[in-house]
Amino acid sequence: MNSIRILLVDDNPSARALLAAFVEQTPGLELCGEAGDGWQGLELTDRLRPDLVLLDLIMPGLDGIGFLEGLANLSGSRRPRVIVLSGVSTDAYVQHSCRLGADYYLVKPVNFRQLAQRISALFPEGEGLEPGGSAGFLLLRLGADSRLEGYGQLSYALEMVSGGGRSMQMKEIYLSTAEAFHTTAACVEKNLRTVIRGMHAGASPHYVRVFGPAAGRRPPDNRTFLRRAAEELAEKER
């Protein structure tokens, strides 16, 4: 099966980073480009010919509605499927977007499992897309910032712990991760702590469900976080 090529059109860099991480960590999906507004999105759509566009509505310059209107000028062979991802939930926007050709309309914050299901429905050959279960995606649901250097290192360490390394000492985890990322154990320890503190400060609903309320409490140390997150991964895989 060929990968489903996806273009992101959203003016919010953080939102694009989160969606990019979802695409890159979901087998069967491929990120082919990113655009910060509708004009750039139309240019990239015409040039890159993505299979699917994940589209925000409220953007400066040409917004998502204008982007959908612009797609009408593309030939059928170049017109991608479109899933709108917007913080606007009013019926008027939903209905207007669908009339202009949007295939699905999902309200932010994005439920990535639901998004994967919608993509599978649009592309039957990709049926069974499953973003959950990986360490990286769990970190995203917990609110990790995928742009931070420690995100990949934490994901690697979590995969190691959940894959049978729960008895490993933290020194071993730091050294193994440092070797994989060509850095030092001290840097790994610091980077993991930075990502964990960020998740604790943001306290997403999923983070609170897994680790409990964050307000007034210190963030978990690296060892505690990895062990609890590994337990969460194990529960998801049952």
Image (cartoon, helix red, strand yellow):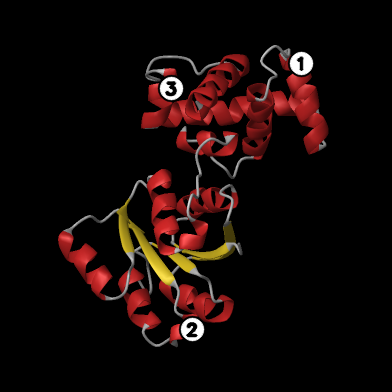
Position of residue 5 relative to residue 111, above or below, is: below
Label whose residue precedes the other's in the sequence (3 or 2): 2
Instruction: Name the disc covering residue 77, or none.
Output: 2
User: Nearer the observer, disc 3 or disc 2?
Assistant: 2
Q: Circle 2 sits in a helix, a strand or a loop, which is it? A: helix
Residue 7 is left or right of residue 214, and the answer is right
Q: Residue furthest left?
A: 91
Give the quadrant of residue 59.
bottom left
Q: Position of residue 38 (x, y in %)?
A: 42, 73
Q: Nearer the viewer, residue 4 or 86?
A: 4
Label 1 belongs to which residue?
171
The percent position of residue 212, horizontal first and vertical second, equals 39, 18
Image height check: is 53 above or below 29? below
The mark found on residue 210 in the picture is 3
| Contact? badges 1 and 2 (CB < 8 Å) | no
Q: CA distance from mark 3 to mark 2?
A: 45 Å
Q: Amino acid at mark 2?
A: Ser
Distance from Cα at disc 1 to Cα at disc 3: 25 Å
Q: Position of residue 134 (x, y in %)?
A: 57, 36
Which residue is painted at 52% across and 81% down in the image?
46
Label 2 CA crowd tier, 10 Å (few <14, some 14–19, many 20+): few
**Label 1 vs label 2: CA separation?**
55 Å
Does label 1 or label 2 sit earlier along the sequence?
A: 2
Q: Is residue 18 visible?
A: yes
x, y percent for residue 74: 43, 86
- Relative to 163, is 4 above or below? below
Q: Secondary structure at mark 3?
A: helix
**Amino acid type at image mark 3:** Val
**Element class at badge 1:** helix
Amino acid on which disc 1 is placed: Lys
